[in-house]
Image: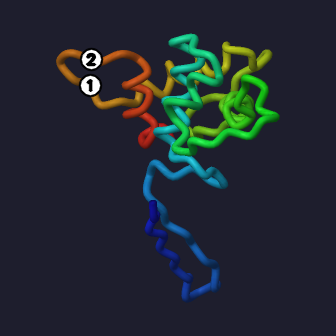
């Protein structure tokens, strides 16, 4: 996948501004939609880290030291409470499943309303671009 990035230089001060698609998060390999979906699957649907990895990650090969977990998902859970999605408030307390559940629910609220809303994990996927 290729992401189109535009860079602009200010003619007054020389500062460079980078413009990326809305679903792109700073310093993340995955899109905001994929991260929000993973948080929803883990926090709301109560799937295991391995099951979430199987649904979200495009890589088929997993290192042998994974030991039934996905470190990237753990990092996203921590980052969700610390302002990964800029329009969400910072969360207090421990990460466990509370932060991904709270973040996914808040991100789902950003989804465009539809007559028959789908599940919260789908709404979180669609609301991610507007929450970033």
Q: Is residue 126 above or below residue 50?
A: below
Q: Quadrant of residue 12?
A: bottom right
Dot 2 crowding, Cα within 10 Å, few <14, some 14–19, many 20+: few
Is 85 on the left or on the right of 74, as rendered?
left
Question: Is residue 109 among what the camera can see?
Answer: no
Q: Residue 105: horizontal and vertical position, in percent?
A: 50, 19
Q: Is residue 7 above or below residue 42?
A: below
In the image, farthest residue toward the bottom: 11
Q: Is the residue under label 1 in contact with that under label 2 (CB below 8 Å)?
A: yes
Separation (CA) of disc 2 from disc 1: 7 Å
Label 1 sits on residue:
113
Q: Quadrant of residue 78?
A: top right
Is disc 1 placed on a helix, strand or loop?
A: loop
Q: Quadrant of residue 50?
A: top right
Residue visible at 66% across and 54% down in the picture: 27
* Closer to the eye: label 2 or 1: 2
Q: Residue 71: horizontal and vertical position, in percent?
A: 74, 34
- Number of the label disc, if any, that sits on residue 117: 2
Q: Residue 16: horizontal and vertical position, in percent?
A: 61, 77
Question: Is residue 10 among what the camera can see?
Answer: yes
Residue visible at 67% across and 32% down in the picture: 73
Depth check, front residue: 53 or 128: 53
Is disc 2 placed on a helix, strand or loop?
A: loop
Depth check, front residue: 116 or 65: 65
Residue visible at 67% across and 13% down in the picture: 98
Is 119 on the left or on the right of 8, as rendered?
left
Q: Residue 23: horizontal and vertical position, in percent?
A: 46, 48
What colour scheme was applied to this rendering of the protein?
A: rainbow
Dot 1 crowding, Cα within 10 Å, few <14, some 14–19, many 20+: few
């Amino acid at each position: 996948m290729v992401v189109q990035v535009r860079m602009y230089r200010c003619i007054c001060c020389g500062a460079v501004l980078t413009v990326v698609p809305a679903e792109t998060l700073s310093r993340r390999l995955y899109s905001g939609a994929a991260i929000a979906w993973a948080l929803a699957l883990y926090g709301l649907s109560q799937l295991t880290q391995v099951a979430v990895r199987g649904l979200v990650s495009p890589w088929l090969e997993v290192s042998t030291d994974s030991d039934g977990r996905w470190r990237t998902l753990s990092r996203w859970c921590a980052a969700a409470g610390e302002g990964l999605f800029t329009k969400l408030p910072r969360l207090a307390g421990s990460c466990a499943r509370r932060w991904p559940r709270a973040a996914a629910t808040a991100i789902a609220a950003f989804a465009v309303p539809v007559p028959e809303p789908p599940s919260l994990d789908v709404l979180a996927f669609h609301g991610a671009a507007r929450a970033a």
